[in-house]
Image: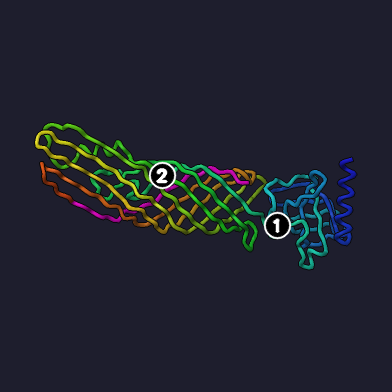
Amino acid sequence: MRSLVFTLLLFSVCLFANNDIFMNVINIKGEYLVADKGSKSGVREGDVFNVMRFTENELDLLAKARVSIVRKNICGLKILGRHKQDSIEEGDVLVIWKSYKQGNNSVFTNNSRAGYPSHKRTFYGIYSRPGGNFGDRDITNDKAVMAKNGFGLGFDYSTPVGAPDLYFISSLHFLYNHIDENILNELRTSLNYKCQRRFNINFSSEPWYVIPIMGGLEYNIFPQEGLGFYTLGTFGVGFIPERNVKITDYCWSNDTIYHFQIKQEMVIKECFSVGAGIILNRRLNLGLRYINFGNVQVDTENIKWLKNEHKISEKSILRTMDITLLTLGFTF
């Protein structure tokens, strides 16, 4: 019964398409297909076919492919782009319509651009490594921020543009990096003063939250079925919320309170990123990205209380900031 419905459906498709050509995929080699019809059936080099699959009594458009070589009873085709993430299999159907050659490619396009992949949505987890002054842990360097490795989440939305496997990509990241408390303990003990007896030491720190929002281009290449690579470049802005790090040291011997503080107001900073990675089965991807924020302003404040008097010294320094991301994502 299933085969009968399939035959009738194909017949109606071909009837609607002015009895044009349909054939079956008999072999797959990477991004190339081999079909069971050739010049004897009217196939010509340069013809563009719809690659389709019969599922639940209907035909789904998987991709489009162009004929690159023709023999009498066989032909080879190169995949132009995919409309679905499903892998093409032997037995899938290739159909061509005269209306497609005449410029009307609205039949079975699934709201995608003809000949190109559909929109992609990718969620991924992130392991982040801070760089520049942001990740510098040298306590003798006034510009060191001392952030440690962190984690995050990301989302990409990709839409095809003008060429096979080329996309416009919009990216959103949420990154979390805490201060390295071991390094701050060293900083606390290295403060330039003498105290015979410490009454109490308080330490408080807020994590770094970095939220880059970017857009750019992504290019995919698939040397063989199920294995691909991508590269991307984006530009946008990064949002860095207000945060503070405080160390307060109470010195019993001379009634002195030493207060050290790193503070930063809300920052909106332009940034750019580049990245590359591996795509498995058009679903799973593993990648590496680099985001550079240039110079970010961070203020420091030192307060020394001596009985009823206090002295304040402040610094405002531009600190370099970049982050390297290791991503593991899933596309749907």
Query: Going by the image, does 76 lie left or right of 224?
Result: right
Query: Callout 1: helix, strand or loop?
Result: loop
Q: Secondary structure at mark 2?
A: strand
Residue position marked by numbered label 1 in the rendering: 111
Q: Which residues are the magenta region?
A: 313-332
Q: Residues within 10 Å of mark 1 (few under 14, many from 20)?
A: few
| Residue toward you, 49 or 77 | 49
The residue shown at (41%, 53%) is: 239
Q: Earlier in the sequence, mark 1 or mark 2?
A: 1
Q: Quadrant of the N terminus?
A: top right
Q: Which mark is residue 129?
A: 2
- The amino acid pointed to by label 1 is Asn
- Residue type pointed to by label 2: Arg
Residue 7, how many percent across, how many down? 89, 48
Q: Residues within 10 Å of mark 2 (few under 14, many from 20)?
A: some
Q: Nearer the viewer, residue 43 or 15?
A: 15
